[in-house]
Amino acid sequence: MTPINAIIISEEQETFQILKKFEEENSIIEIIANADCIKNGILLIKEKKPDLILLDIVFKDNLFFEMLEQLEFSIPKLVFISANKDYAVKAFKHDAVDFLLKPIDFNSIIMAVYKVIKRREMERSYQHQKINNINISNTVNQKNDYVAVASLEKIELILMSEITFCKADGKYTVFILSNGTKVMSSRNLGEYSNILDNSYFFRIHHSYIINLRHIAKISKKDGYFCELSNGLILPVAKRRQDDFNKFIKLKD
């Protein structure tokens, strides 16, 4: 089982130590960062893109939760930790997966993490089912004009001709559209290699898939590069150059 990537935001060193000890003894969670205040926590969330946020902190306003709603990637799951049981109301108001009352023990942490895993599995299953239904519908109607791009919160239908290129961002994929818009998917780039119309899309690098319709120029000086219609220049991996040349010639 792939461990859940978690960030701890806590003013209490004791909380961090308990969770760190839990991580050392259990492979279901990996603590990738920790912060002692909301400001630093927000910066870490944007940088690390965790699956889970463990919160042991008193909130003075809703700015933290408003920030979560503005993230360009899937909103991490929340588990609140507090010595005040009345804080549970606030926790579940903000869609917490679980609330842990101090003093916390390993059993309660295990239950919370498994609830997070279960919630993520259910959301992914639902999204994949919806996407498969869309793909089946496209196949039946012999139309491949759109691609279904899924985060854990929603599915967007994107016109393939408007995709300039796609890039890998860890376990996510970012779609860059011709109007400058960026759409982030919870699926990895490899999955889209099999989904995008192979008449126009080619994976030039382990990090990039480009749309032939948006190539402005190909440069072979000091390497192999594609200049796109938005001005960006992307490298073609050396081992993919021969296949890319064949791909381009087939489209001439």
Image (cartoon, rainbow, N blue to C red):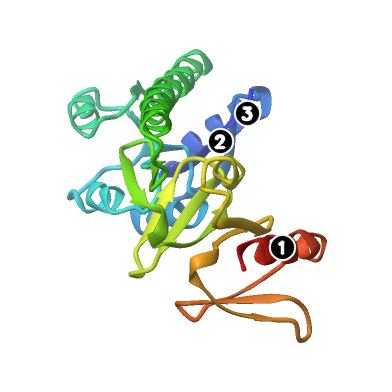
Q: Amino acid at mark 2?
A: Gln
Front position in the image: 185 or 136: 136
Comparing marks 3 and 1, which lies closer to the viewer?
1
Mark 2 to mark 1 CA distance (whole Å):
51 Å
Q: Quadrant of residue 234?
A: bottom right
Q: Earlier in the sequence, mark 3 or mark 1?
A: 3
Q: What residue would you read off at disc 1?
A: 244
Mark 3 to mark 1 CA distance (whole Å):
34 Å
Decide if residue 86 is on the left or right side of residue 134: left
Where residue 132 appears, as percent x and y from the top left, is 43, 27
Where residue 74 appears, as percent x and y from the top left, is 39, 43
Q: Amino acid at mark 3?
A: Thr
What residue lies at 42% left-to-right and 32% top-to-bottom? 135
Q: Quadrant of residue 161?
A: bottom left
Q: Secondary structure at mark 3?
A: loop
Mark 2 to mark 3 CA distance (whole Å):
23 Å
Check the image and report above or below for 193 versus 175: above
Q: Earlier in the sequence, mark 2 or mark 3?
A: 3
- Contact (Cβ within 8 Å) of mark 3 with mark 1: no
Q: What residue would you read off at disc 3?
A: 2
Front position in the image: 159 or 9: 159
What residue lies at 17% left-to-right and 50% top-to-bottom? 61
Q: Quadrant of residue 153?
A: top left
Front position in the image: 181 or 196: 196
Q: What residue would you read off at disc 2?
A: 17
Identify the disc placed on residue 225: none
Mark 2 crowdedness (10 Å alpha carbons): few <14, some 14-19, many ≥20: few
